[in-house]
Image (cartoon, rainbow, N blue to C red):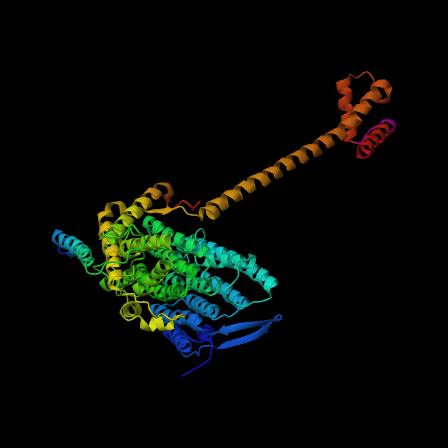
Amino acid sequence: MMTSMHPLFAYLGAAALIPLFTGAWRNRMVLAAGVFGLFLVHSLPEGLAATASFLGHELTVFRVDALSRMFGYIFCLNSVFAFLFAYKLVDVRQQLAALCYIGSAVGAVFAGDLITLYVFWEVMAVASTFLILARKTTLSSGAGFRYVLVHLFGGLCMLAGIIVHVQATGSIALTSLAPNLGGWLILAGVLINVSAFPFARWLSESYPEATVTGGVILSAYTTKTAVYVLLRAFPGWEVLIVVGCVMAVYGIIYAVLENDMRRILAFSITNQAGFMVVGAGIGTALSVNGAAAHAFCSILYTSLLWMSAGAVLAATGKSKCTELGGLHKAMPLTLLLGFIGALTISSFPGTAGFTSKTMIIQAAATEHLVWVLLVLEVASAGVFLHAGLKYPFFVFFSKDSGLRPPEAPRHMLLAMGGLAFLCILIGVYPQPLYALLPFDVAGFDAYKAGKLVGHMQLLLFSAAAFFVMLPLLRNTDTIALDTDWFYRRGGSLFYRAVSATFNGLNDVSAKAAGRMVHGFSEFCRKVPEWVLLAVTSLSPDSFGTGKANAALRLKQIRDSLDAAALPVGGSLVAVTLGLAVLLGLVL
Amino acid sequence: MSKNNKPDFFDRPKTRRMLWTLLWAACGLTLVAQFFASPEPHFGFDDFPGFNALFGFACVVALVLVGKGLGFILKRDTDYYDD
């Protein structure tokens, strides 16, 4: 059955219906919206386009082709599992924010022009912020505040780029862009969202502060929408190869330093997005296929990993590796399902990660990009180190924390089970995934014997090295400095420096002005006294007792001036002279 | 520790020894498999048996050491940004 309804309406419709439902019915309705969204994407005919007129431009608000449909597919599929995971959620604000966020992400990948993309891009930024703020802790409100500022900055870069691009070319089409000023500005906005270094920290400091459900939902959409835009508008931009390689290594190094389990997973998002950015940068049919397939699979395993960490957080209230450990006894099913996610992100043969990541690696090999290949191999070993081993080991094994929480509730296990099933299904039978890809995959086979042996050697010896190096991997309850220092510490230093400079200037000016006024008033008071003193000394009789000495006379003069009781002649002279002096000063 | 004070399955020395043996056996198996299906060399310096094994091991050791080294420079107390 074919329908041509935008899947976005499934989510926006549910958001509009939220006030009509309460309790469990609201959760059912939201879950049904996810399923309906998936059904709508599934039944979209390829080649569909819907246009609308806006300010003299023809907007393509809805474009269905292989690439957009594939991202729409995984976005809606993931929403079903995310809403199942959140089946007992009672916080209506999170449900509303999630529906708006997922809806706008779906809107963004089906956008055929830059203006429509920009609108959904900004709605995503705002809606997602509420999933962080909903945790209602001091840390989450700070992180949410910085998160929205970074994204608004990225959005402004994109908007400026769109304006420059439209001015230069007259076209608003979202298609492969030329490397001019407009293109570079748009790229900057997209790279901020994909968490490229040096703008990577927003992700790993905000997602782990989000709610249990919020973390699961956030992990899937913002970076993958950005990957979609890179594949659509910037394929073959060689700078992306470098950016992606840096991201892949950055994620590993910081994950090794990290203590918070959800932050370790957040760094793995940046690390995995690095592979996709490299795929976009290589820009061949195979690499674009690989990046799109990897985005698809990474949503599955990242969600799965965040769900397992979320289940631990929900059950124990803790997320630091130093406070966790030994949970395999209490939460064996969460461990099992989370470990499938850990194996998948490490691209173990037989899991979805292997069938998609090898495509990007193969593309780099085909193009003879030797150093890229080298970095990607390092990153492959590294992701196994932190997401594949460090996360499950320190949370579920390692030293026993003594925590004995109950196993995750059934709806969470069901959601994780579904994702784990898909991770393995695509791993052993990738054809349905390959059929969704934008280009033909003929000639590619992930499971070549030599490749398999090489990859297994890499992974198993990485694991051996992990356990050999274990004493050096003990976690400490610390954070690691990153480029966010510049806006967190640097921002407050800048504030203090500016405050000291300008408030200092203010103080100095206020004091100087005060002294001047005071001096002038003294001067105006003294002048008549001096004049009177001079006048009275010339004619001693004109002011009371002439025999008085100078000091006594000055006191008399001052009293008389204060009481305005001067003899008329003297006063007149004093006032006239005083006014003359004033006039002289003024002129 | 479980309630009856018996060491947990994963804490028993016997289990640990077995897991180590299994891990190294699996590693050895991939080295043997190399002679039946060797990975395609890409770099010019990777055409000897066991390159991928050495590479994986060295990468993790290097990444942990680099991470540890950077930790001395970059690690701060969790309340570093709190003031």
User: A458 or A562, which lies in front?
Assistant: A458
Query: In the picture shown, does residue A308 fall above or below A554?
Result: below
From the top left corner, tell me how far across and down residue A8 is, in percent: 46, 73
From the top left corner, tell me how far across and down residue A498 is, in percent: 56, 42
Residue farthest toward the bottom in the current orientation of the protein? A1
Which span is picked out in magenta? A564-570
Q: Quadrant of the C terminus of chain A?
A: top right
User: A246 or A554, which lies in front?
Assistant: A246
**Looking at the image, can residue A414 be seen?**
no
Q: Quadrant of the N terminus of chain A?
A: bottom left
Query: Residue A565 appears in which quarter of the rendering?
Result: top right
- Is residue A472 covered in magenta? no
User: A349 or A473, which lies in front?
Assistant: A349
Query: Residue A516 appears in which quarter of the rendering?
Result: top right
Left or right relative to A298: residue B83: right
From the top left corner, tell me how far across and down residue A326 is, in percent: 22, 55
Query: In the picture shown, does residue A346 fall above or below A410?
Result: above
Left or right relative to B64: residue A530: right
How many numbered marks have been drawn onto this rendered protein structure?
0
**Looking at the image, can residue A53 be seen?**
yes
From the top left corner, tell me how far across and down residue A373 is, in percent: 35, 55
Query: In the picture shown, does residue A252 fall above or below A417?
Result: above
Left or right relative to A567: residue A24: left
